[in-house]
Image: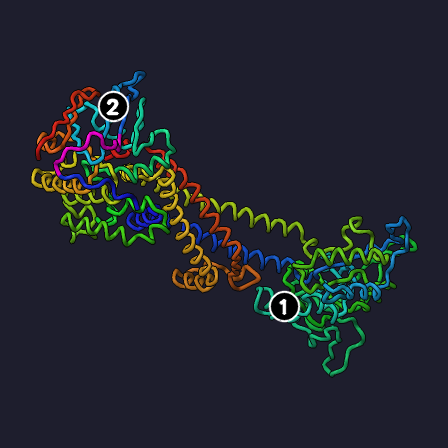
Amino acid sequence: MFRTFLSLRYLKARKTNWIGMAGILVAVGALVLILSIMAGFLEESRRTLRGNLADLVIQPSFQSSVLQENGKWVPMQTDVERMLEIIREDPGVAAATPQLQWYGIFAPDGGESALEKPMQDAIQLIELVGIDAEGEGEATDFRESLEAEFGKKPGLGKHCNVGRPADLDDPFVNLRDQRGRRSRPKVPILVGEQLAYLWGLRRGQEVSLVTATYDEASSKLNETAANARFQVVGSFRSKDNETDSRRIYMDRRALADFLQRDRLWSAVLVKLKDYERDKEEVRARLWSRLHAEGFLSAPGIRINELRTWEDFRATLLAAIQNEKALMGIMLSLVLVVAGFTVFALLSMMVTEKRRDIGILCALGATPRGVLALFLMIGLWEAVIGSAFGALIGVMGAYNIDAIERKLSSTFGFQIFNRDIYLFDYIPAEVSFSGVAWIVGGAVFSTLLFAAIPAWRASRLDPVEALRHE
Amino acid sequence: MSDPGPTLAPSGSQPDPLSEAVLSCSGVRRSFPVGDRRLEILHGINLELRAGERLALMGTSGAGKTTLLNILGLLDRPTEGSVTVAGEDAWSLSPRRRANLRNEQIGFVFQFYYLLPELSALENAVLPAMIKLSRRAYRSSRKEFLDRATTMLTRFGLADRLRHRPSQLSGGEQQRIAIARALLLDPPILIADEPTGNLDRGTGEKVLEILLDEQSERGVALMLVTHDERLAKRCERVLYMEDGLIQADSSAPIPT
């Protein structure tokens, strides 16, 4: 009984113990706050990295045949409707849509547009993406990227002269001319906001694209459709700058016509009902089913044929994860510092309280009881300090944006520059399991540091201790 | 709760020589390392303290009185020899069991009171019970111990000092709290190391009266280290120590 009673009494009576508690409070609070902000930034960055990528992207290698488990080669299937049917049958799939991807460059078009000047100086590879607008909206964030509020964030948006397409549900519609007539048939395109800005594109502007296709029969690259004309009918802004600076969306069939190709698709985008929960399961299921039907090679042979969006960004995501882990480790050193404070304070206390330890022994306390008494002082410091630290950290994380604005206005300079990021608030994401780990770590490390002076106290010779002045 | 201890022996009465020894030691030697040699302080002490006996231990400074007291109080281990408390060879027991013996069988009163400065008078007095009992057991008997300590402190004239910290109390008051603490669990043995050595004469007298009254009333065996001849005269038995040996054992009854 005396351990609990005396440890609490010592804690209350000796103000120096509060320093240790305050140290733990600050360390845990800072750790929770900073890691929450880091997690918020990383989550935002993840979304940014993802851009308009779908949960799963299926890109068959279009080989002539596929080797089955029974050792037989079967011709590779290319019927996208059948493929979509198989995919949509899967219970974990929410939507699937085909996509046709190719590359091209802007072509000079006789000097009537702003394209002429840049075109002479630089060649930029443009990503031509043929989509079914409705399906694309269901399977990716395409629709959201059309709804982006231009002129707000980021800074480039306000210089964009294009803006949303007239009809978000049917974005690939030619614009009417000034007399209300539709202009001669041109292919409507949606350009990335950054691309529009870089090339000075305007709404309604006509551009020419040139590309090369691979002729399988002659094994040659053919320049094609140099004079095909396109009309800018809108722009989009995904969260990924790279995408916005090189991508053009158009109708899938229009792109296939432009490329003069029979095959209308190069990839199928799949959206899952619950990506985080089901991704591996659905991926494995789809792969084995599509392989059995002759659409894909066996799982593991061509790893690029069925990828999650994370596979596309694997390096960057790994870097982010690594950064988070490193930050956690570095910040954990704060806990070690707090632990050292407790160690120093308890060591001092054991020296000061030598006679009390002798008295307790004379009254019948066991060495183990003395050890537990000092461990409990460390435990109270850790539990109270980290509980309040966690509370302050969590409250700080939830209100960090308001706190930053208040501090910025008080001190007269901007602490968080909102122009730099794609988001105009400080993102913070509190993970309660993370907070539990931090609190657990703080308690554990404090106990570890408290164990040394506590052990010293338990080893004191009572006679020597009683002699202490 | 511990046993109330042996039944009362009237004040000043001679202890029965056949009564049970509550504390004894045999062949106790104690030496300490000094440089590369060992300095022997106690050279083989044999001693018995019988139930209800009042024994004074006298001797010159450096004779080994406090060392012997620490060994008999199970705070220090003899280099040789054995100490028996309540029929058990104390140094053959586990540290836990030995600590229990100290808690239940022996009450200490020190020259410098040795109260815990963070606790009130009452809390200091009930500390042995807190050490003895688990949290649950203490919770159920807390009131009983507090009542017992309060009664004792009130009897000692400290009724209005129960909530005071040691730093707010005089030396005499602190020593009275120390006596209450030593007697809380009714131990059969009371060891007092110059209990009045730090007090002025008048206060010392009062404290001594309390100590001796309680001792005789409860029939506790008291072992008292003192330099005070007058105090020694109030004990039934006086041992004189010199150079680590008991040179004289005067068991003659001395009227109080």
- CA gap, disc 2 and disc 1: 105 Å
Determine if residue A414 is in view.
no
Q: Estimate the x, y position of residue B122 in percent, counting from the top left.
A: 23, 50
Query: Could you classify mark 2 by the number of other residues whose Cα lies within 10 Å: few (under 14), some (14-19), or many (20 or more)?
Result: some
Residue at image coords 28%, 40%: A363
Tell me the amino acid under the disc marked 2: Asn
**Mark 1 — on which chain does it sit?**
A
Residue with the mark numbered 2: B46
Task: Look at the image and tell me in which quarter the C terminus of chain B lies.
Answer: top left
Q: Position of residue A98 (x, y in %)?
A: 78, 65
Q: For this view, does B174 lie left or right of residue A236? A: left
- The residue where tag 1 is placed is A160
2 and 1 marks in contact (CB < 8 Å): no
User: Taking the image as drawn, is residue A423 in sight?
Assistant: yes
Residue A188 is one of the magenta-drawn residues: no
Main SS class of the magenta portion in the image: loop
Foreground of the two, A59 or B113: B113
**Which residue sits furthest right?**
A217
Between A241 and B116, which is closer to the camera in this rendering? B116
Residue B73 appears in which quarter of the rendering? top left
* Relative side of A33 to A375, left or right: right
Chain of the residue that carries numbered disc 2 in the rendered image: B
Q: Residue at x 20, y 39 (%)?
A: B219
Q: How many marks?
A: 2
SS category of the residue bearing label 2: strand
Q: In front here: A416 or A462?
A: A462
Residue at 24%, 28% in the rendered image: B48
Residue stretch in magenta: B11-23
Q: Quadrant of residue A247?
A: bottom right
| Residue A135 percent location from the top left of the image | 74, 69
Say what secondary structure mark 1 lies in: loop
